[in-house]
Image (spheres, rainbow, N blue to C red):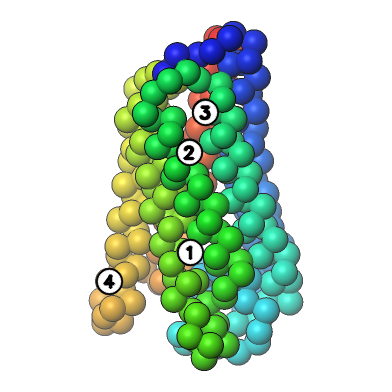
Protein backbone atom coordinates (compact mmCIF):
# COMPACT_ATOMS: atom_id res chain seq x y z
CA UNK A 1 0.00 0.00 0.00
CA UNK A 2 1.36 3.38 -0.92
CA UNK A 3 0.98 6.22 1.52
CA UNK A 4 -0.91 9.17 0.09
CA UNK A 5 0.28 12.65 1.00
CA UNK A 6 2.78 12.55 3.85
CA UNK A 7 0.74 14.77 6.18
CA UNK A 8 -2.59 13.04 5.53
CA UNK A 9 -0.95 9.62 5.75
CA UNK A 10 0.62 10.54 9.09
CA UNK A 11 -2.69 11.80 10.49
CA UNK A 12 -4.49 8.70 9.23
CA UNK A 13 -2.02 6.30 10.85
CA UNK A 14 -2.21 8.22 14.13
CA UNK A 15 -6.03 8.31 14.12
CA UNK A 16 -6.28 4.61 13.31
CA UNK A 17 -3.77 3.71 16.03
CA UNK A 18 -5.53 5.63 18.78
CA UNK A 19 -8.95 4.37 17.70
CA UNK A 20 -7.78 0.74 17.91
CA UNK A 21 -6.21 1.30 21.33
CA UNK A 22 -9.21 3.25 22.63
CA UNK A 23 -11.63 0.58 21.39
CA UNK A 24 -9.74 -2.12 23.28
CA UNK A 25 -9.28 -0.20 26.52
CA UNK A 26 -12.93 0.88 26.50
CA UNK A 27 -14.25 -2.67 26.14
CA UNK A 28 -11.96 -4.10 28.82
CA UNK A 29 -12.78 -1.33 31.30
CA UNK A 30 -16.52 -1.65 30.69
CA UNK A 31 -16.30 -5.44 31.03
CA UNK A 32 -14.47 -5.16 34.35
CA UNK A 33 -16.96 -2.63 35.76
CA UNK A 34 -20.04 -4.57 34.69
CA UNK A 35 -18.58 -7.91 35.86
CA UNK A 36 -17.90 -6.40 39.30
CA UNK A 37 -21.66 -5.79 39.69
CA UNK A 38 -22.66 -9.27 38.46
CA UNK A 39 -23.04 -11.51 41.56
CA UNK A 40 -20.82 -14.58 41.28
CA UNK A 41 -19.65 -13.75 37.75
CA UNK A 42 -17.01 -16.23 36.55
CA UNK A 43 -14.44 -15.38 33.90
CA UNK A 44 -14.03 -19.12 33.35
CA UNK A 45 -17.64 -20.26 32.93
CA UNK A 46 -19.62 -17.12 32.06
CA UNK A 47 -19.47 -15.62 28.60
CA UNK A 48 -18.59 -11.98 28.02
CA UNK A 49 -22.02 -11.52 26.41
CA UNK A 50 -23.69 -12.74 29.63
CA UNK A 51 -22.85 -9.30 31.01
CA UNK A 52 -25.22 -7.75 28.47
CA UNK A 53 -28.30 -9.84 29.33
CA UNK A 54 -30.87 -7.61 31.09
CA UNK A 55 -32.83 -10.55 32.54
CA UNK A 56 -32.17 -12.50 35.73
CA UNK A 57 -32.15 -16.27 35.40
CA UNK A 58 -30.03 -18.92 33.71
CA UNK A 59 -29.01 -19.68 30.15
CA UNK A 60 -27.36 -22.91 29.05
CA UNK A 61 -26.73 -23.63 32.72
CA UNK A 62 -24.95 -20.32 33.38
CA UNK A 63 -26.33 -17.90 36.01
CA UNK A 64 -27.41 -14.54 34.57
CA UNK A 65 -27.70 -11.42 36.73
CA UNK A 66 -26.19 -8.26 35.23
CA UNK A 67 -27.50 -5.02 36.80
CA UNK A 68 -25.42 -2.95 34.35
CA UNK A 69 -26.39 -4.89 31.23
CA UNK A 70 -27.17 -1.67 29.34
CA UNK A 71 -23.64 -0.40 30.01
CA UNK A 72 -22.15 -3.59 28.57
CA UNK A 73 -24.37 -3.46 25.51
CA UNK A 74 -23.43 0.17 24.90
CA UNK A 75 -19.79 -0.85 25.26
CA UNK A 76 -20.21 -3.63 22.68
CA UNK A 77 -21.69 -1.24 20.11
CA UNK A 78 -19.20 1.57 20.71
CA UNK A 79 -16.27 -0.84 20.59
CA UNK A 80 -17.39 -2.22 17.23
CA UNK A 81 -17.89 1.27 15.81
CA UNK A 82 -14.49 2.46 17.05
CA UNK A 83 -12.80 -0.55 15.45
CA UNK A 84 -14.65 0.20 12.21
CA UNK A 85 -13.57 3.84 12.39
CA UNK A 86 -9.98 2.70 12.95
CA UNK A 87 -10.11 0.57 9.80
CA UNK A 88 -11.68 3.43 7.83
CA UNK A 89 -8.93 5.81 8.98
CA UNK A 90 -6.33 3.28 7.89
CA UNK A 91 -7.95 2.96 4.46
CA UNK A 92 -7.81 6.75 4.05
CA UNK A 93 -4.15 6.81 5.06
CA UNK A 94 -2.97 4.41 2.36
CA UNK A 95 -3.19 4.23 -1.40
CA UNK A 96 -4.51 1.45 -3.61
CA UNK A 97 -4.43 -2.23 -2.88
CA UNK A 98 -6.76 -5.10 -2.15
CA UNK A 99 -5.66 -5.55 1.44
CA UNK A 100 -7.16 -2.30 2.68
CA UNK A 101 -10.61 -3.25 1.36
CA UNK A 102 -10.30 -6.70 2.91
CA UNK A 103 -9.52 -5.12 6.27
CA UNK A 104 -12.42 -2.69 5.93
CA UNK A 105 -14.86 -5.49 5.00
CA UNK A 106 -13.77 -7.52 8.04
CA UNK A 107 -14.20 -4.41 10.21
CA UNK A 108 -17.76 -3.94 8.95
CA UNK A 109 -18.70 -7.52 9.87
CA UNK A 110 -16.89 -7.11 13.20
CA UNK A 111 -19.04 -4.07 14.05
CA UNK A 112 -22.21 -5.86 12.89
CA UNK A 113 -21.33 -8.82 15.11
CA UNK A 114 -20.97 -6.67 18.21
CA UNK A 115 -24.19 -4.83 17.43
CA UNK A 116 -26.07 -8.12 17.10
CA UNK A 117 -24.91 -9.47 20.46
CA UNK A 118 -25.82 -6.14 22.07
CA UNK A 119 -29.34 -6.10 20.60
CA UNK A 120 -30.18 -9.82 20.68
CA UNK A 121 -29.10 -11.41 23.93
CA UNK A 122 -28.07 -14.95 24.76
CA UNK A 123 -30.99 -15.54 27.09
CA UNK A 124 -34.04 -17.68 27.77
CA UNK A 125 -36.25 -14.89 26.46
CA UNK A 126 -34.43 -14.73 23.13
CA UNK A 127 -34.62 -18.52 22.94
CA UNK A 128 -38.38 -18.43 23.62
CA UNK A 129 -38.84 -15.77 20.93
CA UNK A 130 -36.87 -17.84 18.43
CA UNK A 131 -34.23 -15.17 17.81
CA UNK A 132 -31.32 -16.47 19.87
CA UNK A 133 -29.68 -17.70 16.64
CA UNK A 134 -29.05 -14.03 15.78
CA UNK A 135 -27.03 -13.69 18.98
CA UNK A 136 -24.89 -16.67 18.04
CA UNK A 137 -24.55 -15.28 14.51
CA UNK A 138 -23.26 -12.02 15.96
CA UNK A 139 -20.72 -13.85 18.09
CA UNK A 140 -19.55 -15.88 15.11
CA UNK A 141 -19.28 -12.80 12.91
CA UNK A 142 -17.20 -10.79 15.33
CA UNK A 143 -14.91 -13.73 16.11
CA UNK A 144 -14.26 -14.69 12.49
CA UNK A 145 -14.04 -11.11 11.25
CA UNK A 146 -11.71 -10.12 14.09
CA UNK A 147 -9.50 -13.13 13.37
CA UNK A 148 -9.59 -12.28 9.67
CA UNK A 149 -8.40 -8.74 10.37
CA UNK A 150 -5.45 -10.02 12.38
CA UNK A 151 -4.38 -12.58 9.77
CA UNK A 152 -4.88 -10.23 6.80
CA UNK A 153 -2.96 -7.45 8.53
CA UNK A 154 -0.17 -9.86 9.37
CA UNK A 155 0.11 -11.10 5.79
CA UNK A 156 0.20 -7.61 4.32
CA UNK A 157 1.79 -5.78 7.23
CA UNK A 158 5.20 -5.31 5.62
CA UNK A 159 3.61 -2.48 3.64
CA UNK A 160 2.83 -0.77 6.94
CA UNK A 161 6.35 -1.17 8.24
CA UNK A 162 5.49 -3.86 10.77
CA UNK A 163 8.55 -5.76 12.06
CA UNK A 164 8.82 -9.44 11.15
CA UNK A 165 8.13 -10.55 14.73
CA UNK A 166 5.00 -8.39 14.91
CA UNK A 167 3.73 -9.83 11.62
CA UNK A 168 4.13 -13.36 12.96
CA UNK A 169 2.38 -12.42 16.22
CA UNK A 170 -0.49 -10.82 14.30
CA UNK A 171 -1.10 -13.99 12.28
CA UNK A 172 -0.67 -16.17 15.36
CA UNK A 173 -3.28 -14.17 17.27
CA UNK A 174 -5.78 -14.55 14.45
CA UNK A 175 -5.17 -18.29 14.25
CA UNK A 176 -5.38 -18.60 18.05
CA UNK A 177 -8.76 -16.87 18.10
CA UNK A 178 -10.20 -19.19 15.45
CA UNK A 179 -8.74 -22.23 17.23
CA UNK A 180 -10.34 -21.25 20.54
CA UNK A 181 -13.71 -20.71 18.84
CA UNK A 182 -13.40 -24.17 17.29
CA UNK A 183 -12.63 -25.67 20.71
CA UNK A 184 -15.65 -23.85 22.13
CA UNK A 185 -17.86 -25.33 19.39
CA UNK A 186 -16.56 -28.82 20.20
CA UNK A 187 -17.14 -28.23 23.92
CA UNK A 188 -20.73 -27.11 23.32
CA UNK A 189 -21.42 -30.03 20.98
CA UNK A 190 -20.07 -32.60 23.46
CA UNK A 191 -19.91 -31.45 27.11
CA UNK A 192 -17.84 -34.53 28.00
CA UNK A 193 -14.98 -32.97 26.03
CA UNK A 194 -13.89 -29.98 28.10
CA UNK A 195 -10.49 -28.39 27.51
CA UNK A 196 -11.28 -25.23 29.48
CA UNK A 197 -14.43 -23.56 30.72
CA UNK A 198 -16.62 -22.29 27.90
CA UNK A 199 -16.28 -18.75 29.23
CA UNK A 200 -12.49 -19.01 29.20
CA UNK A 201 -12.49 -20.28 25.62
CA UNK A 202 -14.83 -17.53 24.41
CA UNK A 203 -12.91 -14.87 26.34
CA UNK A 204 -9.59 -16.16 25.02
CA UNK A 205 -10.86 -15.87 21.45
CA UNK A 206 -12.00 -12.29 22.04
CA UNK A 207 -8.89 -11.26 23.96
CA UNK A 208 -6.70 -12.55 21.12
CA UNK A 209 -8.45 -10.07 18.81
CA UNK A 210 -8.18 -7.26 21.35
CA UNK A 211 -4.47 -7.95 21.78
CA UNK A 212 -4.08 -7.71 18.01
CA UNK A 213 -5.80 -4.32 18.05
CA UNK A 214 -3.30 -3.04 20.61
CA UNK A 215 -0.46 -4.47 18.50
CA UNK A 216 -1.90 -2.79 15.40
CA UNK A 217 -2.21 0.50 17.23
CA UNK A 218 1.36 0.38 18.50
CA UNK A 219 2.64 -0.57 15.04
CA UNK A 220 0.73 2.24 13.35
CA UNK A 221 2.08 4.78 15.83
CA UNK A 222 5.58 3.53 15.07
CA UNK A 223 4.87 3.69 11.33
CA UNK A 224 3.35 7.15 11.67
CA UNK A 225 6.58 8.44 13.19
CA UNK A 226 8.42 7.48 10.00
CA UNK A 227 5.84 8.92 7.53
Q: What crowding class fits label 1: few (fewer than 14 Cα within 10 Å), some (14-19), or many (20 or more)?
A: many
User: Pointer 2 and pointer 1: residues touching (CB < 8 Å)?
Assistant: no
Q: Residue at x 39, y 47 (%)?
A: 147
| Secondary element at image label 1 | helix
Side (left or right) of 13 relative to 130: right
Residue receiving disc 2: 104
Task: Give the mark nearer the N terminus: 4 vs 3.
Answer: 3
Task: Give the mark nearer the N terminus: 4 vs 2.
Answer: 2
User: Pointer 3 and pointer 2: residues touching (CB < 8 Å)?
Assistant: yes
- In which quadrant of the rendered image does the N terminus lie? top left
Q: Residue at x 37, y 20 (%)?
A: 158
User: Pointer 1 and pointer 4: residues touching (CB < 8 Å)?
Assistant: no
- Give the spatial CA distance, label 3 vs label 2: 7 Å
Q: Is residue 40 above or below residue 31?
A: below
Q: Position of residue 117 (x, y in %)?
A: 55, 67
Picture quadrant of residue 32 = bottom right
Task: Give the mark nearer the N terminus: 3 vs 2.
Answer: 3
Residue receiving disc 3: 91
State whether residue 52 appears in this view: yes
Q: Is residue 15 above or below residue 105?
A: above
Side (left or right) of 203 relative to 84: left
- Give the spatial CA distance, label 2 vs label 1: 17 Å
Q: Position of residue 112 (x, y in %)?
A: 53, 56
Q: What crowding class fits label 3: few (fewer than 14 Cα within 10 Å), some (14-19), or many (20 or more)?
A: many
Picture quadrant of residue 82 = top right
User: Pointer 1 and pointer 3: residues touching (CB < 8 Å)?
Assistant: no
Q: Which mark is residue 138?
A: 1
Side (left or right) of 7 relative to 71: left
Amino acid sequence: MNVRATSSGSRGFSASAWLYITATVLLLVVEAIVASRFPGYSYVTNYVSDLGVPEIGTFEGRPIDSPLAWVMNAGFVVHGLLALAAAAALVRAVGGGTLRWVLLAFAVFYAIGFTLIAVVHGSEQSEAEGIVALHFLGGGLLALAGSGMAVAAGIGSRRLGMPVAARAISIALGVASVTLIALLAVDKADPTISVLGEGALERGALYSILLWQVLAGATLLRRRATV
